[in-house]
Image (tube, grey):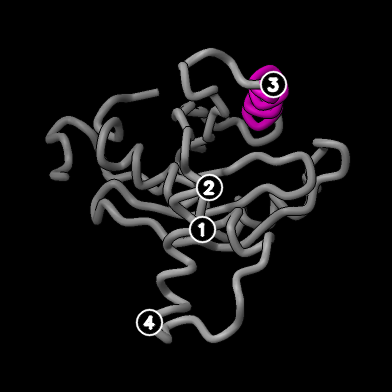
Amino acid sequence: MPENPGASPRLALGLDYGERRIGVAAGHTLTGTAQPLGTVAAHGGVPDWQALGTFVRQWQPALFVVGMPYNMDGSDGVLVDRVREFCAELTRRFGLDVVEVDERLSSREAEDRLRSQRASGERVRRVRRGDVDPVAACVVLEQWLREGSQQRP
Protein backbone atom coordinates (compact mmCIF):
# COMPACT_ATOMS: atom_id res chain seq x y z
CA MET A 1 0.00 0.00 0.00
CA PRO A 2 1.51 3.39 -0.91
CA GLU A 3 2.43 5.74 1.85
CA ASN A 4 0.10 8.64 2.60
CA PRO A 5 1.88 11.78 1.32
CA GLY A 6 1.21 13.59 4.61
CA ALA A 7 2.55 10.81 6.81
CA SER A 8 6.21 10.01 7.35
CA PRO A 9 7.40 6.40 7.16
CA ARG A 10 7.13 4.56 10.46
CA LEU A 11 8.38 1.34 11.96
CA ALA A 12 5.91 -0.48 14.18
CA LEU A 13 6.21 -3.40 16.54
CA GLY A 14 3.28 -5.81 16.31
CA LEU A 15 2.37 -7.70 19.47
CA ASP A 16 0.21 -10.79 19.88
CA TYR A 17 -0.66 -10.87 23.58
CA GLY A 18 -0.97 -14.16 25.42
CA GLU A 19 -0.96 -15.09 29.07
CA ARG A 20 2.22 -17.19 28.62
CA ARG A 21 3.87 -15.67 25.55
CA ILE A 22 3.69 -12.45 23.59
CA GLY A 23 4.60 -12.70 19.93
CA VAL A 24 6.65 -9.82 18.52
CA ALA A 25 6.98 -8.70 14.89
CA ALA A 26 8.38 -5.62 13.16
CA GLY A 27 6.94 -3.88 10.12
CA HIS A 28 7.41 -0.69 8.18
CA THR A 29 4.87 1.53 6.49
CA LEU A 30 7.29 2.33 3.65
CA THR A 31 7.61 -1.28 2.49
CA GLY A 32 4.26 -2.51 3.80
CA THR A 33 5.96 -5.67 5.04
CA ALA A 34 6.44 -7.31 8.42
CA GLN A 35 8.68 -9.99 9.86
CA PRO A 36 8.33 -12.13 12.97
CA LEU A 37 11.00 -11.39 15.57
CA GLY A 38 10.42 -13.67 18.53
CA THR A 39 8.52 -14.02 21.77
CA VAL A 40 8.50 -12.44 25.18
CA ALA A 41 7.64 -14.67 28.12
CA ALA A 42 4.63 -13.77 30.24
CA HIS A 43 3.67 -15.20 33.61
CA GLY A 44 -0.01 -15.03 34.44
CA GLY A 45 -0.41 -12.44 31.72
CA VAL A 46 2.38 -10.22 33.04
CA PRO A 47 5.05 -9.81 30.38
CA ASP A 48 8.77 -9.81 30.91
CA TRP A 49 8.98 -6.04 30.51
CA GLN A 50 12.77 -6.10 30.38
CA ALA A 51 12.73 -8.49 27.40
CA LEU A 52 10.09 -6.38 25.67
CA GLY A 53 12.22 -3.31 26.35
CA THR A 54 15.10 -5.01 24.55
CA PHE A 55 12.96 -5.29 21.39
CA VAL A 56 11.95 -1.63 21.76
CA ARG A 57 15.56 -0.44 22.13
CA GLN A 58 16.75 -2.61 19.25
CA TRP A 59 14.00 -1.68 16.77
CA GLN A 60 13.08 1.84 18.00
CA PRO A 61 9.46 1.69 16.83
CA ALA A 62 7.26 4.73 16.36
CA LEU A 63 4.25 2.82 17.73
CA PHE A 64 2.87 -0.56 18.79
CA VAL A 65 0.18 -2.51 16.94
CA VAL A 66 -1.57 -4.90 19.31
CA GLY A 67 -4.05 -7.61 18.38
CA MET A 68 -7.38 -7.45 20.19
CA PRO A 69 -8.93 -10.87 20.87
CA TYR A 70 -12.53 -10.32 19.82
CA ASN A 71 -14.99 -13.20 19.50
CA MET A 72 -16.11 -14.28 16.05
CA ASP A 73 -19.34 -12.27 16.47
CA GLY A 74 -17.29 -9.11 17.19
CA SER A 75 -18.00 -9.03 20.91
CA ASP A 76 -15.19 -8.69 23.44
CA GLY A 77 -13.30 -11.92 24.08
CA VAL A 78 -12.33 -13.00 27.58
CA LEU A 79 -8.89 -11.36 27.33
CA VAL A 80 -9.91 -7.99 25.86
CA ASP A 81 -9.81 -6.15 29.20
CA ARG A 82 -6.42 -7.63 29.99
CA VAL A 83 -5.08 -6.66 26.56
CA ARG A 84 -6.34 -3.10 27.04
CA GLU A 85 -4.49 -2.95 30.37
CA PHE A 86 -1.39 -4.24 28.56
CA CYS A 87 -1.80 -1.51 25.93
CA ALA A 88 -2.09 1.19 28.60
CA GLU A 89 1.05 -0.13 30.29
CA LEU A 90 2.93 -0.14 26.95
CA THR A 91 2.18 3.56 26.55
CA ARG A 92 3.10 4.31 30.16
CA ARG A 93 6.41 2.44 30.03
CA PHE A 94 7.60 3.31 26.54
CA GLY A 95 5.79 6.57 25.72
CA LEU A 96 4.54 5.25 22.38
CA ASP A 97 1.08 5.17 20.85
CA VAL A 98 -0.74 1.86 20.63
CA VAL A 99 -3.05 0.90 17.78
CA GLU A 100 -5.52 -1.92 18.41
CA VAL A 101 -6.26 -4.33 15.55
CA ASP A 102 -8.90 -7.06 15.42
CA GLU A 103 -6.92 -10.29 15.60
CA ARG A 104 -9.67 -12.80 14.89
CA LEU A 105 -8.17 -15.85 13.18
CA SER A 106 -4.60 -14.47 13.26
CA SER A 107 -3.29 -17.51 15.14
CA ARG A 108 -5.00 -19.86 12.70
CA GLU A 109 -3.48 -18.00 9.75
CA ALA A 110 -0.08 -18.12 11.47
CA GLU A 111 -0.38 -21.89 11.97
CA ASP A 112 -1.38 -22.33 8.32
CA ARG A 113 1.65 -20.31 7.17
CA LEU A 114 4.02 -22.36 9.32
CA ARG A 115 2.53 -25.68 8.17
CA SER A 116 2.80 -24.55 4.55
CA GLN A 117 6.47 -23.65 5.10
CA ARG A 118 7.04 -27.09 6.60
CA ALA A 119 5.27 -28.84 3.73
CA SER A 120 7.32 -26.94 1.14
CA GLY A 121 10.60 -27.75 2.87
CA GLU A 122 11.24 -24.10 3.72
CA ARG A 123 10.89 -25.02 7.39
CA VAL A 124 12.72 -28.11 8.66
CA ARG A 125 11.48 -28.65 12.20
CA ARG A 126 7.88 -29.19 13.25
CA VAL A 127 5.71 -26.28 14.29
CA ARG A 128 5.69 -25.71 18.05
CA ARG A 129 3.37 -23.54 20.11
CA GLY A 130 5.98 -20.83 20.63
CA ASP A 131 6.56 -20.62 16.87
CA VAL A 132 3.02 -19.41 16.24
CA ASP A 133 3.07 -16.30 18.43
CA PRO A 134 5.57 -14.14 16.48
CA VAL A 135 3.95 -15.17 13.18
CA ALA A 136 0.52 -14.23 14.60
CA ALA A 137 2.01 -10.84 15.58
CA CYS A 138 3.23 -10.55 11.99
CA VAL A 139 -0.28 -11.32 10.67
CA VAL A 140 -1.78 -8.61 12.91
CA LEU A 141 0.86 -6.11 11.82
CA GLU A 142 0.38 -6.93 8.14
CA GLN A 143 -3.36 -6.35 8.53
CA TRP A 144 -2.68 -2.91 9.99
CA LEU A 145 -0.17 -2.13 7.23
CA ARG A 146 -2.78 -3.05 4.58
CA GLU A 147 -5.79 -1.40 6.16
CA GLY A 148 -4.94 1.31 8.60
CA SER A 149 -1.32 2.38 8.62
CA GLN A 150 -2.12 5.65 6.88
CA GLN A 151 -4.18 6.82 9.84
CA ARG A 152 -2.47 8.35 12.84
CA PRO A 153 -3.17 6.56 16.14
Question: What is the spatial separation of the Cα atoms under label 2 and label 4, in whole angstroms?
Answer: 20 Å
Q: Which residue is mark 4?
A: 120
Q: Which of these two is toward me, 100 or 152?
A: 100
The residue lying at 78 percent from left, 53 percent from top is 41
* Few, some or many residues within 10 Å of mark 2 (<14, 14–19, 20+): some
Residue type indicated by callout 4? Ser
Instruction: Indicate the quadrant where residue 93 lies.
Output: top right
Residues shaded magenta: 78-91
Tag shown at residue 107:
2
CA gap between label 4 and label 1 equals 14 Å
Q: Earlier in the sequence, mark 2 or mark 4?
A: 2
Structural distance between the alpha carbons of marks 3 and 4: 36 Å
Residue 79 on the magenta span:
yes
Q: CA distance from mark 1 to mark 3?
A: 22 Å
Which disc is residue 5 wearing? none
Mark 3: amino acid: Val
- Disc on res. 78: 3
Numbered mark located on residue 111 in the image:
1
Q: Residues within 10 Å of mark 3 (few under 14, many from 20)?
A: few
- Work out whether mark 3 precedes mark 2 in sequence or the reverse, and give the earlier one: 3
Image side of residue 72 versus residue 125, left or right: left
Q: In the image, what residue type sits under mark 2?
A: Ser
Q: Position of residue 111 (x, y in %)?
A: 51, 58
